[in-house]
Amino acid sequence: MIELVNLTKAFRYKGQPKYIVRDASAVFPSGTSVALMGRNGVGKSTLLQLIAGTMNPDSGRVRSEGLVSWPIGLAGCIHPELTGVQNVRFIARVYGVDTDEMVEFVREFAELGNNYYQPTRNYSSGQRARLNFGMSMAIRFDCYLIDEVTAVGDSSFKAKSAQLFQDRMANSGAIYVSHSTSAMRQTCTAGIVLEGGKLTYFDDIEEAIDCHERNLLGPNYKRIMLLDPD
């Protein structure tokens, strides 16, 4: 379970505070995959960093039970001066998992070849994504924070990644950010909508999607739905 308690985070924009969340409280139940929705620039990635503990709130706190991942999809956990395998060893020690087992898992999964032993500053964006995803899947987190992960590689690698992710989700929860409605429906059963610093939780993913689309379309929502009821 992850609980946000009176959480507030704002940045200064043109001399005024721009709130990501403002005195927001919410509960993400254990073992539930929750889609985090909101318009572009609303602060979804920032909220994931607050939940992960890689960014501090202005006030309030985040409570969590179990092991929570870093935001998967961001390359922030990869040090550019370390090799791929050195990055893996570092993360293994941070999370207290068997180093050799994790090194071997990521080596086999990420399919980086000799690049695994080279500094990650020389990696392509796809190689960094494969390394990051491999590291996250090597650890059995209770909740995975997924930030717009885009499958990379050929069809075989994409299928392997999707299968591994579904295997992990069988025994874990997730907070999932994606612009793909179909991906959210496939992965999540519940949803939470971030709008104007406020969080609204829905047990039903369809209700969350409907709320999010209403926010995006505003006054045009009813007219569009009448024109295209499907």
Image (cartoon, rainbow, N blue to C red):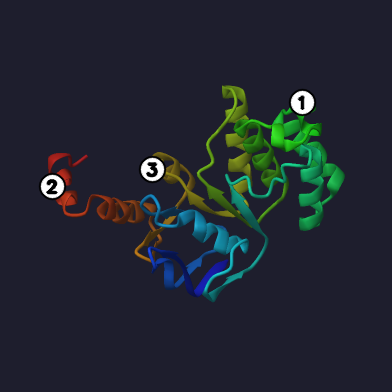
On the question of residue 34 being in view, the answer is no
Residue drawn at 76 percent across, 29 percent down: 115
Closer-to-camera residue (218/230):
218
Residue 37 image point, x, y percent: 40, 53
Residue drawn at 60 percent across, 34 percent down: 125
Label 3: which residue?
Answer: 181
- Label 1, label 3: how many angstroms apart (C-alpha)? 34 Å
Residue 93 image point, x, y percent: 82, 54
> Is tag 1's residue or tag 3's residue first in the polypeptide sequence?
1
Q: Is residue 40 above or below residue 105?
A: below
Mark 1: which amino acid? Gly
Mark drawn on residue 113: 1
Label 2: which residue?
Answer: 223
Mark drawn on residue 29: none
Label 1 element class: helix
Q: Quadrant of residue 13?
A: bottom left
Closer-to-camera residue (80/152):
80
Label 3 element class: helix
Closer-to-camera residue (212/33):
212
Please give left or right for residue 134 compared with residue 23 in the image.
Answer: right
On the question of residue 54 being in view, the answer is yes
Mark 2: which amino acid? Arg
Mark 1, mark 3: which one is toward the viewer? 1
- Label 2, label 1: how many angstroms apart (C-alpha)? 54 Å
Badge 2 crowding class, 10 Å Cα cut-off, few under 14, some 14 to 19, many 20 or more, is few
Residue 84 image point, x, y percent: 76, 38
Badge 3 crowding class, 10 Å Cα cut-off, few under 14, some 14 to 19, many 20 or more, is few
Q: Are marks 1 and 3 in contact (CB under 8 Å)?
A: no
Which quarter of the image is occupied by the C terminus?
Answer: top left
Number of callouts = 3
